[in-house]
Amino acid sequence: MRWFSSSGVLVSLPFQSSVGRSVLPLSGSIWQRLEALALGLHILSLFFGLAGLLWVVPHPEWVASLPPIGLQAFSLSMGNGGVAYMVFGALAAALMGSRLLGVRRLLMFLIPAVGISLGSELLGTSTGIPFGNYGYLSGLGYKIAGLVPFTIPLSWFYVGLSSYLLARVALRTQRHWLIHFEAIMLGALLLTAWDFVLDPAMTRGSIPFWTWFQPGPFFGMPLQNFGGWMLTGAAFMTVANLLWGEDQPILDRRQLVGPLVLYVANFAFALLMSLGSGIVAPAGLGLLLGLGPALGLWWSAKTPSPYRDQPVPPSHPEQDSIPPLQAVEGEAGRDWDTLEDPGWVGAK
């Protein structure tokens, strides 16, 4: 954002309001560093979780050889590792969403995502609708109403946000009236594909985190589970789409790097968990319906404009613009009689 002081000096402020530009003060420094830190801690937590579940737990003799402080650290990490990676993931998504969407649009997604997913999970764990008959075990944090760990709606939020932002790439090239519905369904599919891979590993691995009381044909899970995932994801994405109204964000390839990294990191965690547990078929299905489309959508996104990060021109040129030069005499004067700031050329 630019404006002129009373002395005529051009001043730049770190606040810009358009999509893809900074929407928080200091977002170019402090906020983006916090976002990178939260995302890094999220990925690091995923890595340590994989190491613990796939290597440490299957080797109890190694755990037994640890000194007392090592045993305490191991117990603490196994008891809180799942909480840590989901809290850091939600924090990274919130900071990322604030930067890319603005706080207002972020809240229009976050509140429905957390509220609707929590409602679905509470309904599912108490009645079996819409996912089937299941229950959460320990290791994922405090349980709301004694049924659903508080971290579970957070995971719906951050994986759902990255899925939906990637799916919305289709809105840039299509204009028919069903395109918003298609983007919502594609976002819900990316979200559900993550569960294709994660759910078998988290219920049939060395340490299960939830259990199915209703056996089903998909590695012990009912097919109803995936219908519930599609329904829940599509519900909160639809609410966010309606709340955004005319102010619909469509991000370019560079802006989508963060959502892609968040999605790929969580997908890779689920994939390695499944493969490490000897569960191969869901991994292939997830690659086909989740990771592959996510990478394709990111690649098909519009490349960023070279002027995207240029300052936004004044909204009232008659008050804020640089006074025009007097017409230059001669041949050139008929074509060039004003001075433009080249930083505004091509800016949107």
Image (cartoon, rainbow, N blue to C red):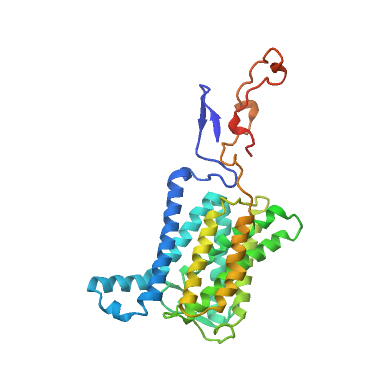
Residue located at (63% from left, 31% from top): 316
- Whether residue 18 sits left or right of residue 173 in the image: it is left
- Whether residue 160 sits left or right of residue 278 in the image: it is right
Q: Residue furthest left?
A: 67
For the N terminus, the quadrant is top right
Q: Position of residue 103 (x, y in %)?
A: 54, 51
Q: Quadrant of residue 330?
A: top right
Q: Quadrant of residue 178?
A: bottom right
Q: Is residue 228 visible?
A: yes
Q: Position of residue 219 (x, y in %)?
A: 55, 83
Q: Quadrant of residue 298?
A: bottom right
Relative to residue 138, is residue 314 depicted above or below?
Answer: above
Residue located at (70% from left, 63% from top): 182
Residue located at (37% from left, 73% from top): 52
Nearest the eye: 299 or 198: 299
Nearest the eye: 123 or 207: 207
Residue located at (36% from left, 73% from top): 78
Q: Position of residue 221 (x, y in %)?
A: 56, 82
For the C terminus, the quadrant is top right
Q: Position of residue 57 (x, y in %)?
A: 36, 78
Total numbered badges shown on the rendered structure: 0
Q: Is residue 147 visible?
A: no
